[in-house]
Image (cartoon, rainbow, N blue to C red):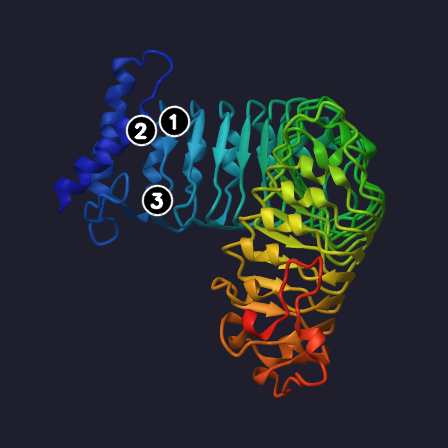
Amino acid sequence: MMPLLFLLLLLLLLLLTFSLSSPTSSNSLQGDALILASLKQGIDSSNLVLDSWNTSKPSSCARGPNPKELGNLTSLKQLYLGYFNSFDGGIPAELGRLANLVHLDLSSCSLDGEIPWQIGSLLSLDTLFLHTNQLSGPIPPELGNLTRLVMLDLSNNALTGEIPAQLAALTELRLLNLFMNRLHGSVPGFISELPNLDTLQLFTNNFTGSVPLRLGVNGQLQVLDLSSNKLTGTIPDSLCSSNQLKVLILLKNFLFGPIPESLGNCSSLIRVRLGQNYLNGTIPSGFLYLPQLNLLELQNNYLTGPLLENPSTSRHPTKLAQLNLSNNLLSGPIPVSISDLSSLETLLLGGNRLGGAIPNSIGLLGQVVKIDFSGNELSGPIPPEIGHCVHLTFLDLSQNNLSGPIPAEIAEIGILNYLNLSRNHLTQCIPRSIGGMRSLTVADFSFNDLSGWLPSTGQLAYLNASAFAGNPQLCGPALNSPCNYSTGPARLRRVPGSSSSCSRSAY
C-alpha cells in the first residue's frame, strides 16, 4: 500500500503543481524533492488511503488529512486538490507560505473550519477557489491583500458575517461568487466600483438593504444573481449600461418599484428572473421580444398595464422559450404578436386580469408545451387554431369568461395529458374526438353550460364525476343522470356550424 500511495501522491504533485512560469533552479528543485520525501515519511496509510481505480471518475480519490508539509513547496505556482478528494480538517495555515502560488483550488473536498487569514499572504494569487466545502466563520479581511486576484469563489459553504470592506482593493476582480452561505449585512457599494467585475453571484444568503445603485456602471457586468435574500429598494437603472448584461436574477427578495425601461433595450439579455418580489408599474416595451432572451420570469409581483405588441417591425426570430407572467395585475388583451415568440415552450399568464379574446395567432406557437391562461377575464370562443399546438401536454383555460363550443381540434393535440376548461361559459357538447384522446389523463369540464350525452366508454369514462359537475344538461351513465331522449332530442343532435357532434351514436 505505501509504495503505491507515495507514487500516486508524487505524480499528483509533479503533474498538477509544477506548472512554473519561469525556470526553476536546481537547488530549489532539490529542496522540493526533499520535501516530497518528507511527505512520504509522514503519510500514514491508516489516515490517507486511496480508493480503487474507477473508470467513472477521472482519477482515484484521496482521503485523509490535508498535509501541512505542502506549505514547504515554496516554488509552487499552481495547486489543485479539489473535486475528487476528501480531506479531514481545514485548510492548513501553512499554505500561506506559498509565496509564488498563482492558482489555488481546494473546491469540493470536504474541508471545514475557518479560512485561515494566512491565505491573505499569497500576494501572487489570481485565482482562489474554495467553493463547495463546509467552511465556516467570517471571510478574512486579509483577502483584501490579494490585489492580483481575478477570480474568487467561496460559494456553497457556511460562511457568516459581512463582506469585508477590505475587498474593495481587489480591483482586478472579474468573478465574485459568495452564494449559498450565511452572510448578512448589506451588499457593499464598493462592489459597483470594481472596474473589471463581470460576474457577481450572492444568492441564497441573508443580505439586506438595497441593490447598489451604481451596479453596472463599470460597463462590464454580465452575470448578476442576488436572488433569495432580503433585499429591498428598486432595481438600478444602470445594470445594462453597456449592453453586456446576460443574466439578471433577483427573484425572492422584497424589491419594489418599476422594472427599469432601459432593460427593454438590453439586447444582450439571455435569462431574467425577477419573480416573487413587490415590483409594480408596467412591463417595459420590447422586453418580451429581446432577440437573445431565452427565459423571462416576472411572476408573483404587482405589475399592471397591458402586454404590448411587438414594437419591432423587422420581426426577427426570438429565442424566448419560457415566459412566466402569472399572478400579477396585468390587463388588456393577449397581444396578437405573441406568435412572434415562435420558440416558446412554456407560456404562463394565469392569475391576471387579461381580457378580450384569445388571439388566433396562438396556433402559430408550434413548440409550446405548456399554456396556462387560468384566472383571467378572457372572453369569446376558444380558437380552433389551438389544435395546431401539437406539442402541448398542458392546457389550462379555467376561470375565465370563455363561451361557445369546445373546438374538436383540441383532439389533434395527440400528446395532451392535462386539459382544464372549468368555470367558463362553454356550451354544446363535449366533442366525441376528445373522448377518444388516449393521452388525456386529467381533464376538468366542470361549471360550464355544456349539454349532451356523456359516453360510458372512451377516455372520458375514466374521469371522476366531479370533472363534469355544474353542467346540469350533461347526461349519461357516468353522471347517474339518464338522458331523456323523448323530451330533449334536439340537444343531442349535431349543432349546425359546429365541428363537434352531440348525437349518442357519435360516441
3D distance between C-alphas at marks 2 and 3: 16 Å
3D distance between C-alphas at marks 2 and 1: 7 Å
Residue 115 in percent (x, y) is at 51, 43
- Identified at 74% across, 37% down, the residue is 337
Q: Are marks 2 and 1 in contact (CB under 8 Å)?
A: yes
Instruction: Residue 183: tell me if it is visible.
Output: no
Neighbour tally class for label 2: few under 14, some 14-19, many 20 plus, Cα within 10 Å? some
Secondary structure type for disc 1: strand
Say above or below: 316 vs 473.
above
Residue 314 in percent (x, y) is at 72, 22
Q: Amino acid at mark 1?
A: Gln
Mark carried by residue 66? 3
Pick the quarter of the image with the C terminus. bottom right
Mark carried by residue 245? none
Instruction: Residue 290: tell me if it is visible.
Output: yes
Neighbour tally class for label 3: few under 14, some 14-19, many 20 plus, Cα within 10 Å? many
Left/right of residue 459 with respect to residue 169 in the rendered view: left
Mark carried by residue 78? 1
The tag earlier along the polypeptide, 2 or 1, is 2
Q: Are marks 2 and 3 in contact (CB under 8 Å)?
A: no
Q: Give the mark count.
A: 3
Q: Amino acid at mark 3?
A: Asn
Secondary structure type for disc 3: loop
Kindly identify which residue carries mark 2. 16
Neighbour tally class for label 1: few under 14, some 14-19, many 20 plus, Cα within 10 Å? many
Labels 1, 3: front one = 1
Residue 147 in percent (x, y) is at 59, 24
Residue 367 in percent (x, y) is at 56, 42
**Front position in the image: 92 or 110:** 110
Labels 2, 3: front one = 2
